[in-house]
Image: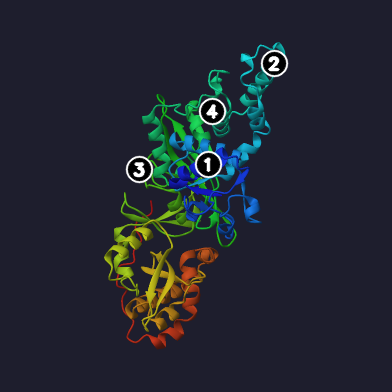
Amino acid sequence: MEVVRKDLGAIWGQLSNHYQNGAGSTVLNSNGSVVSKDSLVFDDPFASQKIIAARTEDRPGVQAFDTSSLFHILDAVIRMMQSMLLGDGKNIKIDPWVNHWKELGDIPGRMKRADWSYQYSDDAGVWDRGGKEIRQLLVDMEKHKDPERRAILDSLWRTHVPEYTVRKPDFLSFNPSIMNSEDFEFNQRQFKATGMLDHFTADVVKQMGEGQPQIRKDITPVIDGEQVKGTIHLNKVKEGDRYFLNKFDMEKVRPNGTSVKQTFYNNNRPKAGDEGSTRRPPQQWTQKRAFNFLSGRPVYDKNNDEWNKINYNQKLKNGNYATQRFDKSYGFDIHKTMQGYSYADAGDQRKMDQMVESYERGNMVKAKMVDNEGKKEDYHTSLSIRTSSMRLFDKDKKEVPLEEQVQKGLITKEQAETLKEIYGKRQKQDAENKIDPAAQSQGKSQKEEEKQQQGQSQKENGKLGNSLDGKDKEATSKQRHSPKH
């Protein structure tokens, strides 16, 4: 379960009323007057049916929570959030905090029942029993060292321990500012710049506060519905508490079942075995751009004014896959390419510019196309740099053959003829290359993106010829690969 950050205070306020009124169990919305359903995000698609009730007996089957535990959990979450230890994501996950509560075992109950005012008694027996009870409780509390549990214990202490009774132990002093604010914000920006703010967690901050020279954070984010694995590498400066996130690893599984792993660098220091020996302005990799690159889609490098695409067929000495680079001399023009397709929003410059930015990040972009009957339909689209074209996929992400694009009027005749000529030339080149055994041995694995796009289209070129009038002509843009780096 997740809670929308902006509504957390209102939810906690409503929950406080339940708690103070002695309600044994509650949900986060009793009548819809305080907190909207949209404040709660459940993995269960039917969870919206489970959140409108004040007590479990009011609505059988409704998901309910223990008021006391949830009160202290959300109190701790708010304090951590106010201390900038939870990043600034839209939603806050509650389930991990519920697990932290469970790990505390019987401590919350013991804190509630303990005689914190035993020292005010004139009875020696009360002093003896109370002293032993509190001392053992403090020993057990100190065993929980992670910030989340201690934040919960701090909430329990403020609720159950009367003022001027037992002195609050130093280990419960909730002071997350373990580094100065400037260093904290600098370190946080490192994560935000790479689109990984969710991974700027309390355990990372704790290690930074301890001055660890190197920090490794394993991550398993879900991107576009696909779970990937990775590791964030942080290095501390020699003086101060600042850390640099200069690189991160990412690994994903391709549709063919093979796994690809790459290290992405966000600095321009040459690496042993890396491409090129001269300094280049760094490509600014984010978690999402890295995922798109590993998925085989081209990503635009603004700093070097070129498109980068993974080369699955070549590995470097450092274990990374090589990068195919397409600079200005290659002749690819994304705006001109998009003009060859029937985008429904072609007349809206703002929306078209937004799509261009999304393509540049390597995304598969959802776009409406207009067919020759004026019907608008959603397609998933991505770039093909080598053919200066778009790849179109239907709602099930099955690629739309070129012939079908022509029949529906999704592509201009000029663009289709250009693609037909490109495919024909490559088919001829492939046939000629088969004479060379060395070239033949590489044929099956070469140019994977083109094969995916050509596979159906090349077989249908014969059919397509009848629907495309006119003579063969030269490609409209110069198809020349930039020098390899």
User: Which of the two marks, 3 or 2, is nearer to us in this view?
Assistant: 2
Of labels 4 and 2, earlier in sequence is: 2
Gap in angstroms between the C-alphas marked 1 and 2: 34 Å
Label at residue 278: 3
User: Is residue 305 positioned above or below 25 on the image?
Assistant: below
Q: Which residue is mark 2?
A: 126
Report helix, strand or loop for mark 1: helix
User: Which of the two marks, 3 or 4, is nearer to us in this view?
Assistant: 4
Q: Nearer the viewer, residue 223 or 259?
A: 223
Gap in angstroms between the C-alphas marked 3 and 2: 77 Å
Report helix, strand or loop for mark 2: helix
Circle 1: is it few (<14), some (14-19), or many (20+) Cα within 10 Å?
A: few
Label at residue 158: 4
Report helix, strand or loop for mark 3: loop
Left or right: 478 as drawn, with respect to 125: left
Q: Which residue is mark 1?
A: 17
User: Which of the two marks, 1 or 4, is nearer to us in this view?
Assistant: 1
Q: Nearer the viewer, residue 356 or 75?
A: 75
Q: Quadrant of residue 146?
A: top right
Instruction: State how the image is colored.
Output: rainbow
Please state the horizontal and vertical placement of residue 288, each as a whole percent of the image. Answer: 45, 52
Three-letter amino acid code at disc 3?
Thr
